[in-house]
Amino acid sequence: MAFTLAQKILAAHSLTPISGEEAAPGRIVNCRLDLVLANDITAPLAIKSLAVMGAKRVFDKNKIVLVMDHFTPQKDIASAEQVIVSRNFAREQDITYYYEGGDAGVEHALLPEVGLVGPGDLVIGADSHTCTYGGIGAFATGMGSTDIAAGMALGENWFKIPESVRVTFTGDLPPYMGGKDLILWTIGKLGVDGARYKALEFDGPVIEEMPVEGRLTMANMAIEAGGKAGLFAADRKTLEYCKEAKRSSDTEIAPDPGASYEQHLTLDVSNLEPLVACPHLPENVRPVSELKDLAINQVIIGSCTNGRILDLRNAAEVLRGRKVKKGLRCIVLPATPGVFKAALKEGIIETLLEAECIIGPPSCGPCLGGHLGILGAGERALATTNRNFRGRMGSLESEIYLANAAVAAATAVTGTITHPGKI
């Protein structure tokens, strides 16, 4: 039996050896875990569940990662106390990978950057966008805090082997476009529940040429189509990326020829233009040209979706020599300290400051309605984030539009949703 990427990784991690039809979609497998992740919102819930279970120690202090990124720097007393719970637990358990303050960044940008996850890994996280790591060939998925607690205690968890949907991109990608546009197209095609508990597997000539950062962006938003995971083959580019993250023993991984897929979508991207997800669902996708007169109050460039150095480079290219429109707030949040340092070294931060952007710390910030850019009633934001549900970034009477970093930068200059090529 030929395996998809999801089947291959889950079969390799099964506690009981399986092969052939034993790895067919729908089968339940108990698997060992390579990494268990939680953040400042979800870790305290998992810690409480561990206590209820009677677990005294985590299964491996080197395979638990806690990242304080959602409401940090702490925005109020409640968020400060959440971090205290997480910090005390990390000390008691001697957790190796605890990130807070100056070494912390947005978790799903941070973990691949520092080499904590790689091709073929099986990762669970108490955050729905854990699927990001599929961009480098890992089967990674979000779970509730009780399941995370079980993973922390046992080092294993059960999975139903998912059906896989293959999405192939061909043609030549036009300027000012990248992974964000391709995943928005996919979500628009499938809908927000069209891939429920399925693995989205991306391939094709466009994907082969795409930087790893773009693949991470696409895997990140697999959950917005209901996906259990978003997966890319780990190729030479992947291994180079992982080597830069100080990993040395990774190998390429790909689906088997002849693997079976529930559905196969194909798109020639040659005539595609940048896409925008309109309120109040990521599936409500329209070409940027259809929204050119829509006024915006705030632009956000950052998040686990599009806060990497490639995104900041794309934004700076558009903003160089220009100014943010008066009356509009353009907030830039580098996703990690490493991204911030690289942006400083390349002069990107200076370019953004000259354009009169607001530069914030590596944090999830306004993406989940946390802080550092909350919307009031009647305001519209264009953001490089991953969700635009009603009230996601503040007032229930606000609106959120999703786009890539170049579109966000162009919009910041004009004050209306704008194709970067138009300025």
Image (cartoon, rainbow, N blue to C red):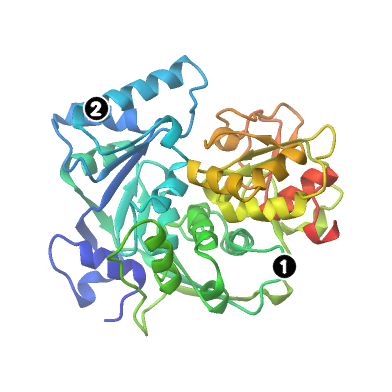
Q: Position of residue 399 (x, y in %)?
A: 71, 38
Q: Is residue 156 above or below residue 2?
A: above
Q: Earlier in the sequence, mark 2 or mark 1?
A: 2
Q: Amino acid at mark 1?
A: Pro
- Dot 2: what SS? helix
Q: Position of residue 130 (x, y in %)?
A: 41, 49
Packing grade of label 2 (10 A; few <14, some 14-19, many >=20) is: few
Horizontally, residue 37 falls left or right of residue 183, namely left
Q: Is residue 219 above or below residue 304?
A: below
Residue tagged 1:
175
Residue at far bottom of view: 258
Horizontally, residue 346 falls left or right of residue 244, namely right
Residue 44, image quadrant? top left
- Dot 1: what SS? loop
Q: Amino acid at mark 2?
A: Arg
Horizontally, residue 56 falls left or right of residue 9, namely left
**Residue at the (17%, 43%) spot, across then down:** 60
Residue tagged 2:
91
Q: Position of residue 259 (x, y in %)?
A: 36, 80
What is the distance, in whole Å, between disc 2 and disc 1 at their CAs?
A: 48 Å
Residue 79, image quadrant? top left
